[in-house]
Image (cartoon, rainbow, N blue to C red):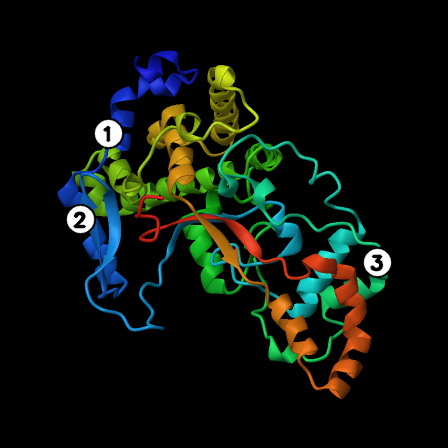
Amino acid sequence: MDPSSTSPCELDREFAPQIAQLLAAPPLQSAQEYYDRLIQSGKHDGIRVNFSSKHGKGVCANKEFAEGDLILKDRILVGAQHSLNKIDCTVCSYCFRFVGSIEFQIGRRLYWQSIGSNSDCTNRRHYHGSDAGSSASSSGATKENSNTLPEEALRSLINGNLSLPFTDHFGLPRVVACRGCEEERYCSQSCADSDWETYHSLLCTGSKTDPSRRSAIHKFVEHANGTNDIFLVAAKAITLTVLRYNKLKRQPQKNTDESNFSLLMEAWKPLSMGFKKRWWDSVALPDDVDFCDEDSFRQQIRDLAYTSLQLLKDAIFESECAPLFSLEVYGHIIGMFELNNLGLVVASPVEDYFIHIDDLPDDEKEEAEKVTRPFLDALGEDYAVPCEGMCSFFLSSCPPH
């Protein structure tokens, strides 16, 4: 049966031929040329992408590597920090590097912990999906701790008015704010500009954003945070494509020589390389769902995706890119992350800091812990929570997994 005939999304029927082209596997020669250019541009002379009719595509070595050699330094195609993890870790929204200072990281986390910001988060309902596809899988929002500290001390840490011993050994880049909103932070102006140009300019909720659009973005984000934050990654995949399309269209030779849909296909190319299936067809049946209820479960998943898509359309819909906002494409994008995503984990420098304190000579350690011990006790056993999220890489996401 034609999926568009049963879809609740009108765009699935209106743009069925274009959607079929977007979701078709790229020709082998075109894919090979794409990956060859990608490897060459990244100067990865020791690897190649091979294609197999049996196993699909995979990254292979074309020379011998010695122990300790760097084989691949890959770039993230699309990624996002888990929503609940943002309470524990403040990182660059583009490259996910920890920012601010050790004091800022500790103070901000303990501040949110002290006001109980996670009390309603930890009980949120998350629909079934891959572990990497739901913010429920994160090490999570900070657990309650009875060792609370005065709010004034925490604010002093955050504002830089209180310094902890030996934190100068663990310098972090200063926080660069988004040019529009106060919700995204970066480790440099370069990352801020790159995120703006690649994803964030369409999702920013700053004062310069039209109020109705800003409200729509908030509703989309709130729905994703309350259900499954894989929708946030899917939204970034769509904004990536829309912004690439707009950039291509501004090029004079592209504007005159190619149709709008040809430009959309070119803008879609990085995402076209990922193996895709509809999310509601590819997600594994959870253990707590009986086999006889499978159809109902998958229908619920599709309905959830459709609700998310409608909210996203209200926020950032662009008519020239309409096929991207079909349920069929949205479902395949989410399914691509379900099947190909890799976990994003960045170790916390706070862990390294407290290990450093513990390794000091006894007299220095004793003196330092007079200051640091109350903060370590307040953080509790989860003091070393890393940045966690989900992402798809240009090359590392090639192998089947």
Q: Return the x and y of residue 28 as percentages of the image width and height.
A: 16, 41
The residue that disc 3 covers is 148
Q: Return the x and y of residue 256 as percentages of the image width and height.
A: 19, 39
Secondary structure, mark 3, is loop
Q: Quadrant of residue 41?
A: bottom left
Which of the two discs, 2 and 3, labels the residue nearer the N terminus? Answer: 2
Task: Give the number of the mark in front: 1 or 2.
Answer: 2
The residue that disc 1 covers is 21
Classify mark 3: residues with Cα within 10 Å, few (<14), some (14-19) or many (20+).
Answer: some
Secondary structure, mark 1, is helix
Disc 3/disc 1 C-alpha distance (Å): 57 Å
Residue in view at x 60 percent, y 37 percent: 225
Q: Amino acid at mark 3?
A: Thr
Quadrant in which the C terminus appears: top left
Q: Residue furthest right?
A: 150
Left-right relation of 270 to 212: left
The residue that disc 2 covers is 32
Secondary structure, mark 2, is helix
